[in-house]
Amino acid sequence: MRNTPFWWILISFMVLLDIYFFQALKVVTHSASGRTRTIIYASYWVLSISAVILLIILPYLHFEKQARFTRTTIFALIAGLFFAKLIASLFFLIDDIRRAVQWIAGKLFVSKTTEKELQAGETISRSVFLSWAGMIVGGGLFGTLIYGFGNKYRYQVKRVKLSYDNLPSSFKGLKIAHISDIHSGSFTNKEAVIKGVEKIMKEKPDLILFTGDLVNNTSDEMEEYMDVFDKLKAPMGVFSTLGNHDYGDYASWETPDEKAANLKKLLDIQSALGWRLLMNEHVVLERGEEQIALLGIENWSAKARFPKYGKMEDAYSGAEKYPFKILMSHDPSHWKAEVLEKYPDIDLTLSGHTHGMQFGVEIPGFKWSPVQYLYKEWAGLYEKQIADNSSEKGQKLYVNRGFGFIGYPGRVGILPEITVIELS
């Protein structure tokens, strides 16, 4: 990416944004002393120029595995500054548009005397107000992102009870621990991850289901965490699927064979952990003398930028006869795009992928994240109405908010999740 035109367009945009932001900074500091303004301006440009230089050289710096967090944190800080300035600049832009309209209107419709009277009547310049508003909102966003660094290992247990008329009686009370998006390559605190795994095991689940993205890019990211995740055990087993990051599509490989070897190693890792990886197939779960089907497919996304490796027809074949079916599919866009359309007897689909963007707001009765503009189903439980204006519910989807993190080394509002599902 570092040599692409987009990369240099982004850097150029950052520079222009810095210049634009600086104009508003001059407005809000106009009443300060000359010495104070000099300190503020010098600090601003040292920080801004350093951010641009770091962004240019960051792809060329080779960090050791243990220093990946340093690189990620630097990038997150630069990105945080960028978005803070971008959000603040929206306020500045509104003010510039207002002033442009006012100037044009004054030239066309208002006499100079009237214009002076209107300006004299203002007790505070609206330019100063909007500039301050932009600074406060942008600064608040940046501060929030910094605060979020401390939340990345704050694992939250979400308890969900789901009722089905067609669930065999032997499976009533079945407790499923659902996790997703481990992203082991992002971890830097092994003790914190161990506590997260211990939290899962304290729930004493009958079944553990993992819906993909064990690593960020390469299989060797799991080396340090094998003795952590091999502690995940359940009486009915641990089952898993692959996510889009597991295929090595986002890493550079010398040859196709090298990439294929990486994927094979990742499959071997899941076996070594004691997990049963489902690759476009299903297994039969037995309890008492009754059975249900558990299906798992490779990554399948309705979004063009993500791959469609999954073959639902292969996973489903032979599962028709079972009265209750659970599907593990990493990307939640699969649910509406294919599952609801073609497989109406898939009772419960479990997904992850979105992480809730690791940023948003969740309070009782309300949740919001920017990711919802890309994914309609992005966190929590979703149900299909069987018929219009009916209170009866049909197929269900649960989207886990992710156990790990990637990109931004933190979480704001959307915390890492361990889902405990009880069937009845």
Image (cartoon, rainbow, N blue to C red):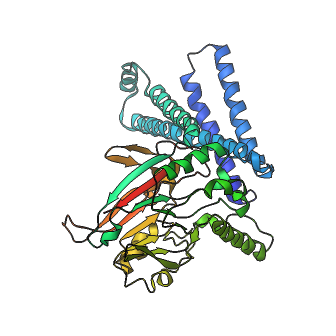
Question: What x and y, as percent, mark residue 53?
Answer: 76, 42
Foreground residue among 21 and 81: 81
Query: Is there any visible trace of residue 286 in the rendered image?
Result: yes
Residue drawn at x 21%, y 69% as measured from the top left: 388
Image vertical order of residue 405 relative to residue 94, above or below: below
Query: Is there any visible trace of residue 409 in the rendered image?
Result: no
Residue drawn at x 65%, y 41% as measured from the top left: 78
Q: Where is the N terminus found, in terms of image quarters?
A: bottom right
Foreground residue among 398 and 3: 398
Question: What x and y, as percent, mark residue 16?
Answer: 64, 42
Image vertical order of residue 340 relative to residue 186, above or below: below
Q: Where is the C terminus found, in terms of image quarters?
A: bottom left
Foreground residue among 332 and 157: 157
Image vertical order of residue 253 relative to residue 80, above or below: below
Foreground residue among 87 and 245: 245
Total marks in image: 0
Residue drawn at x 62%, y 51% as measured from the top left: 407
Residue drawn at x 44%, y 71% as measured from the top left: 327
Quadrant in the rendering for residue 256: bottom right
Question: What x and y, as percent, mark residue 250?
Answer: 67, 64
Q: Is residue 38 left or right of residue 134?
A: right
Quadrant in the rendering for residue 14: top right
Question: What x and y, as percent, mark residue 59?
Answer: 76, 52
